[in-house]
Amino acid sequence: MSYAKVLGVGLVGVTGHLVEVEADLSPGLPAVVISGLPDTALHEARDRVRAAVVNSGQRWPNRRITLNLLPATLPKYGSAFDLAIAVALLGAAGELPLLPVEGVVVLGELGLDGTVRPVRGVLPMVTAAVRAGLDRVVVPVGNAAEAAVIPGVRVRAVDTLHRLVAFVRDGTPLLEPPPPAPAEPAAGPDLADVAGQGLGRRAVEVAAAGGHHLSLLGPPGAGKTMLAERLPSILPELDDAAALEVTALHSIAGILPPDGRLLRRPPFQAPHHSATVASLVGGGSGLARPGAVSLAHRGVLFLDEAAEFSKAALEALRQPLESGQVHLTRARGGTRYPARVQLVLAANPCPCARPGGDTLCECSPLARRRYLGRLSGPLLDRIDVQVRVLPVRAAELMGTDPDGEPSAVVAARVAAARGAAAERWAAVGHRLNAEVPGPLLRRPPWRLAAQATADLRGRLDRGSLSARGFDRIIRLAWTIADLDGRTRPDQEDVREAIGLRTGEEA
Ligand SMILES: [Zn+2]
């Protein structure tokens, strides 16, 4: 036999597609030809596979070798096809009977010495295999736990090409994946640690309940970071579909914890203000790495010292915030990664960043305007909740004020509020208040009573509030009503919403 075929998986964004790796041997000058839109890594595969085959004690066929990866139209990146190529090649050379790997997806990168190395993206690859109706996969031992997360598939692991050859040739068993890891450890930091900060805590709770973006403005030491870091602790756990999506993105980035389990907590990403555009939105050669905005998908993207980010970085976030996904331009077609995040900005009110706040500030009014002006266009416009936080008073720190509620208590209110909103908006295809378009909120049956919006309409008439700002405050009022268990926002809810939007005292 001079032809053989083994299955692999290629990724387009987070979606895997079955790939047939064909090998054909023909008489002629010894050479290796690879076709089917391979990238540079695949060309390098030729040299890796040859060294690995020879160093595993197998005979390299000295004939004309044609390797073809189908479908040809699918772009293929990275080194995950190495193992499938090696097995197909040995099968075509008549060195191996391929019956044992028929209908089996084979994934893995080969080292020159024949070791099998872990690859990025195994989780979405195994998902694709299951979706294609296959129930057996062979993966690198370093990816076995991750692959075993997917139900309905028998995972076997290999550490060397030699082990896989021995299995195919005479049935020597492969390695078993480790037993499933226990449940994820408790969510990160808890709101109970935050002393005082009534307004800040309320802002975080409202943001969580309605899915609103949030900005925290205040001097250093005001606890902006503490508050932001605790937002994930009051968000609901991810459902199965979201958990798979989030885990797949982290798998493609190669940053899954080694014990293998679905990520159930909303992720939290806090890129430094010196972050490059590529690290924020993704990029790199070969299989593109998701950036912070995709690693925060279904969770929180926190920009601390937001005004210190480069203009290019802030600009690059505009498109993902609008569309919920990142589009990376590649040499051969683009890659899309999901990026539906809840944005939290923290910033000092001015460039001098004096801990005392406004009283010690030496900045000119122009410098202050310019500083925050960098945020205004692309980002600040999208942020529903904008509050100023001040350093905590000594009394709060000394614990004379009542203790802050723990995250679990707040999370229960958030979950109930989200449930009420989801039920209300189900008929119009939305789940969170932040997603509901303004015009819908201004029409019956959702239009609020004239009395509730009197103050708002006054501001609109005086020009101190834009139409967009009006809609944002109404959205917030709905969230506040949901949190407090009212079926419709009243005048008080609108008043609190104005405070959360404009920073005015409620
Ligand atoms: Zn200043």
Image (tube, rainbow, N blue to C red):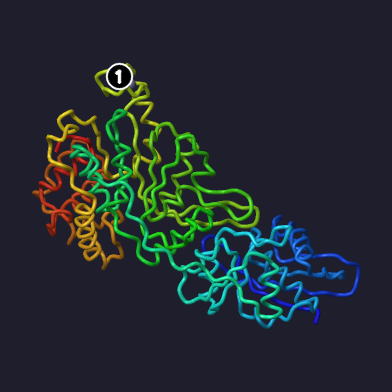
Extreme-left residue of the structure: 451
Percent from the top left, x then y, of residue 260? Answer: 47, 62
Query: Which residue is the extreme one toward the right?
Result: 29
Measuring from the top left, give residue 278's x and y in whole percent. Answer: 54, 44
**Other residues around mark 1 within 10 Å, as few (<14) / some (14–19) / many (≥20):** some
Where is residue 21, by image quadrant? Answer: bottom right
Dot 1 corresponds to which residue? 361
Query: Picture coordinates of residue 406 (x, y %)?
Result: 21, 49
- Identify which residue is drawn at 30% across, 19% down: 361
Give the camera-side residue of 450 and 269: 269
Q: Nearer the viewer, residue 111 or 430?
A: 111
Under mark 1, the amino acid is: Cys
Does residue 457 appear in this view? no
Q: Is residue 454 visible?
A: yes
Position of the C terminus, as image quadrant, is top left
Image quadrant containing the N terminus: bottom right
Q: Secondary structure at mark 1?
A: loop
